[in-house]
Image (tube, grey):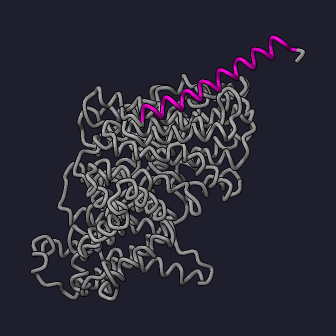
Amino acid sequence: MRDLIQKSPVQTLAFGVGLAMVIFQIWLLLAPQQPLLERPVHLAFGLVLLFLYKPLTTEALPVWLRVGIDAALILSTVAVLGYYLTGFERLTTRMENVSPVLKVDILFGALLVLLLLEGSRRAVGWVLVWVLLVFVAYAFWGNALPGWLNFRGFGVEAATEITTMTTAGVLGITTSTSVNFVFYFILFGAFYAAVGGGQLFIDLAIRAAGRTTGGTAKAAIVASSLMGSISGSAVANVVSTGVFTIPLMKRTGVPPHRAAGIEAIASTGGQLMPPVMGVAAFIMAELLGIPYTDVALAGLIPAVAFYLALIMVVDLNARRDGVRAMTHEEIDQTPAIGPRLHLILPPLVLMALLIAGYSAAYSAVLASLACLIVPFFRRATWIGGKELVEALRDAPKQVAEVAVPIAAIGLVIAVAVQSNLALKFAGSLLALSEGSIYASLMLAMVGCIIMGMGLPTVAAYIIGAVLFVPAIEDLGIAPLAAHFFIFYYCVLSMVTPPVALASFAAAAVGKASAVQTSLSAFGLSLVAFFVPFAFVFDPGVLAQGSAAQITFSAVSLLVSTALWAVAFGGWAGRPLGWAVRLPIGLAGLAAVIAPSGSSVWLVSLIIGWALVVGVATLSRRSDGASVANPAE
């Protein structure tokens, strides 16, 4: 067993800490504790694991000093945890803004903030650290800023209280989401990947779509949508599925940057695909105060429209560029699906439990247990200690890489709310857009994309929700639609140049140009780029309303995005020139944005599809004439 865990003492220690975290989280599921007990412990586990799995690597320092710094950070984390455990009774019974803030509170509060900054740097890089430092500076020196940004600023005691001593800062809603939702779904994803679920999704996609035109690209999209719905991480999805799908696409004639771009956008969309979606979706449920199942249900129609439009564009591009389908021999090289088909049961168990009304955490744990039972249904899929250890090692590691950054973002929430920055920002946005709903939405869209450059989706979404959602809601848009609007564009920021994390990961896997891959992925994302405008103006797209209204809205969105996809695909029986693609695209865009059933929507669809059908009909007649007169 030791060989399976790792021979390195540090790796062995990390595995032990991770296993303790798993046991602690299962205990919490059976015996929930006070927030100021469970959240500090969860966060301490995350910080220690992050410092163990991502040690300091700068070559400017000698090895002994790097090891010493890591050890000091781990001991500091333990000290901070000791502060919360020994001061638990005082912290839970004190009155906010009334009870005194002690020097020990300031000391350990500052230490926790420093640990979170360094942990965030190791988890996601410097971009988030700079964002956090800007908000920390604003908390103390906001009184030096002009105009609507000005506020009196916090003293050290007030800043300590709102950020580290209550459930409104780093131990607030973001850490709560990590404790109560994120951990359990990452645990399920790790177990399912360890027993071969990810490979099954890839092979299923190849068998289902491989024989069609551009089949490898379609298979990549299907596989990434399935795996992304379980993993909830664009970059992790790229790395896990891209190593199989990108070389496969390249073998059938897809250029390297195009193959990497397809994988990047397909993996990114996994965060939009129920049942798991991404970490940000769980935080959305917490911010809205609704069950996660309601968020997942609302996300279903937009996600389906996103992927169908993407598949359609890939298909049309393949027809235009002459990309071949997979041969029977290539498909036959894929391992048989039948002997492994029972591995599809764990995700089905998860969905069934969620639909039945069980809590998200409980459903994820039972689905994880199913991962340990289902492989034994057939001898060919039996698992052993290796797979179990892999899952128990990977899950806490992945949790740490999420828990620490989103806890740090609690600083942003606390400062933005307590300084009234969120409402001031909303007012300035409305003033800048002069009350125009379209202008406000466009400004929010651009803001989300800019913030998402270099930030994980969850970080961009939380900041976007704090700053932009109040402004959008002031325009009369429902809270669910406002949050989904922000969430959607923060997801797409993962493939938006110049900093596109999913595209960069795909380029590395596919040995392609990062710039070309980013541009390719962004170009593909445009096919569904304006879908959020649809559910802002049409509640049925988010499964709100009667069954008839939801059905009509779903069909309307699919037909509209399909028209938009034809313009981007550039094919309707024959290659389309820009003189035809432009009016089709404008008609499709108008149909996507306009409310379903409106006169603009109807006229746009009629004009757009009339052009498509007309071109396709002329193409068929031209082909028929060529066959009838082969000499010509």
Q: Quadrant of residue 192?
A: top left
Q: Residue at x 33, y 71 (%)?
A: 412
In the image, taking residue 363 as reference, residue 308 lies left or right, namely right
Q: Which residues are magenta?
A: 601-630
Relative to 105, is 591 above or below? Answer: above
Q: Quadrant of residue 424?
A: bottom left
Q: Residue at x 23, y 47 (%)?
A: 290
Identify the image quadrant of the C terminus.
Answer: top right
How many labels were placed on the picture?
A: 0
Q: Is residue 624 magenta?
A: yes
Residue at the far top in the pictured view: 628
Query: What x and y, as percent, mark residue 349?
Result: 35, 32
Q: Is residue 29 visible?
A: yes
In the foreground, 127 or 567: 567
Query: Secondary structure of the magenta portion, mostly?
Result: helix
Query: What x and y, as percent, mark residue 516?
Result: 68, 55
In the image, taking residue 193 as reference, residue 576 lies left or right, namely right
Q: Residue at x 22, y 51 (%)?
A: 289
Relative to 575, is 408 above or below? Answer: below
Query: What x and y, as percent, mark residue 202?
Result: 57, 35
Q: Is residue 58 magenta?
A: no
Q: Residue at x 44, y 56 (%)?
A: 490
In the image, taking residue 553 as reference, residue 63 lies left or right, namely right
Q: Is residue 194 visible?
A: no
Relative to 552, is 1 above or below? Answer: below
Query: What x and y, as percent, mark residue 627?
Result: 80, 14
